[in-house]
Amino acid sequence: MTLPRHSTRFAIIAASAMGLLIAPALPEASAMPRGAAPVIESALPVVQVAQSKKPKPEFWRKKVRLQTNENPGTIIIDTSSKYLYYVEGNNRATRYGVGVGREGFGWSGTVKVGRKAEWPDWRPPATMIARERAKGRKIPAYMKGGPNNPLGARALYLYKGGRDTIFRIHGTNQPWTIGQNMSSGCIRMMNEDVMDLYKRAGVGSKVIVIGPNGKGAKNLYTDRGMDFFGSLFGG
């Protein structure tokens, strides 16, 4: 059956419009010069690790319902439960799994984010170098930032009274240690999680660290579990 000429023209227009809807969007010529590399967030890539190396699902990032009197933007770290909360207000928070200090290296207190760094260099304190040397392990006095650096993709340096505590919230090239007591007091996060927190928490952000015995946690916050709508709609 032969279609009328106007019907054929309509079908062609409709097919062209559908092609535009399903085709991948291309940058305008003026937006990306020929031969230019795509813009990436940083000069160094995040190391890709096998899924088997990831921490247990309970330590994956989640939106949760959090009851607390702390202001939005506050970071609460419960080293007993291995969770870090970024308070968002309206009884909501983002919860991240963390790795914390091993036995004898736990601590508690209220500090602030004194500075931040992307792909930070690592300068272990002299006490750590001496301690590891006594165990027969030699660690460098300095390591340039990068995928193989123990501090990972980002670092938030924790200060108290305007002075560096030597503790950091940082990424790790050993994501399977999240949820464990493995560090010398620093707070470890998966690289993708610390990058997310880094974008949200500014210099001066309040950080409350609950010690390994969990003392004071009940008076500070109550985690009421997954925020279904926040997780679904990103609110």
Image (cartoon, rainbow, N blue to C red):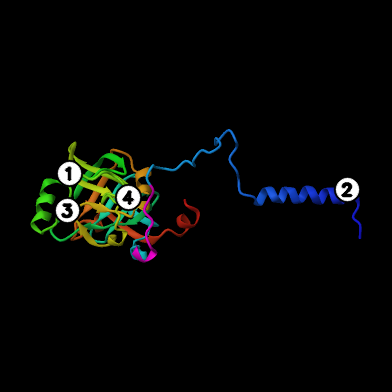
- Single out the mark in the foreground, 1 or 2: 2
Q: Residue at x 27, y 59 (%)?
A: 82
Residues packed near mark 1 inside 10 Å, few (<14), some (14 to 19) or many (20 plus): some
Q: Secondary structure at mark 1?
A: strand
Q: Which mark is residue 107?
A: 3
Quadrant of image for the N terminus: bottom right
Q: Secondary structure at mark 3?
A: loop
Distance from label 3 to label 2 (Cα)?
78 Å
Q: Which mark is residue 6?
A: 2
Image coordinates for residue 167, horizontal then vertical, percent: 20, 47
Q: Which mark is residue 165?
A: 1
The kind of residue on which mark 1 rests is Thr
| Mark toward the start of the polypeptide (1 vs 2) | 2
Residues packed near mark 3 inside 10 Å, few (<14), some (14 to 19) or many (20 plus): some
Query: What residue range appears in magenta?
Result: 45-53
Distance from label 4 to label 1 (Cα)?
25 Å
| Mark toward the start of the polypeptide (4 vs 3) | 3
Residues packed near mark 2 inside 10 Å, few (<14), some (14 to 19) or many (20 plus): few
Q: Which mark is residue 230?
A: none
Image coordinates for residue 75, horizontal then vertical, percent: 30, 48
The kind of residue on which mark 2 rests is His
Q: How many marks?
A: 4
Residue ID for mark 4: 147
